[in-house]
Amino acid sequence: MSEDIEIKKKQIKDELDQLRYEFKIELPKVIAEARAYGDLKENAEYHAAREQQSFVQARIGQLSEQLAQLNDIDLSALPPDRVGFGSTVTIIDEDSDDEITFTFVSSNEVNPPEGKISLFSPVGVALQNRQAGDNVQINIPAGKRNYYIEKLMTIHGNEFEKRKS
């Protein structure tokens, strides 16, 4: 899994390089060309280029923050056998027997429909430092629910599974 972090860092760095080139080289040319058309109040090309420039600048900031977060991760400090950053966890709802799988990601990567959540979410807080085989009660908007941690794969690549008997 540590190689996953390195791959993610490389992807972010590559996107940052492309965006910085666009921000510093390409967009200034487009803006200068659009300015040459005259009146900026009704210049759609100019306004579109400025909007793109704002978007690129915001994305550079977002990716820079994400890269800093990834650089701050000390893998040796993450538990090899408990839920933590980068872990993928499968839990079973004890009332409905529904199976749900989550992966704990950085705040910039959160995407609940894809099962990517933060350790700072209510589910993340409840599951953090738990192990396969643990029962846990989680407060969700619908109320308190009881879950059983059936599977755990840590960021270290360690896999644990304890089926409920």
Image (cartoon, helix red, strand yellow):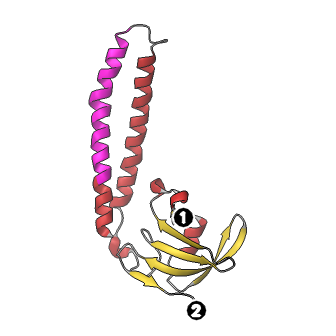
**Residue range (magenta):** 11-37
Q: As displayed, is residue 94 above or below residue 21?
A: below
Sequence-wise, which precedes: disc 1 or disc 2? 1
Q: Position of residue 147 (x, y in %)?
A: 62, 78
Q: Look at the magenta stretch and give its main secondary structure.
A: helix
- Indicate whether residue 85 is drawn in magenta: no
Amino acid type at circle 2 is Ser
Depth check: 86 or 152 in front? 152
C-alpha span from label 1 to label 2: 31 Å
Which residue does the numbered mark 1 point to in the structure image?
120
Nearer the camera: disc 1 or disc 2: 2
Look at the image and tell me whether residue 91 can be seen. yes
Question: Which residue extends farthest bottom?
Answer: 165
Q: Which mark is residue 143?
A: none
* Residue 105, quarter of the rendered image: bottom left
Q: Residues within 10 Å of mark 1 (few under 14, many from 20)?
A: few
Left or right, 68 with respect to 17, comes to: right
Secondary element at image label 2: loop
Q: Across the whole image, how many numbered discs are drawn on residues?
A: 2
Left or right, 147 with respect to 10, comes to: right
- Indicate whether residue 26 is drawn in magenta: yes
Question: Which residue extends farthest top?
Answer: 38
Amino acid type at circle 1 is Phe
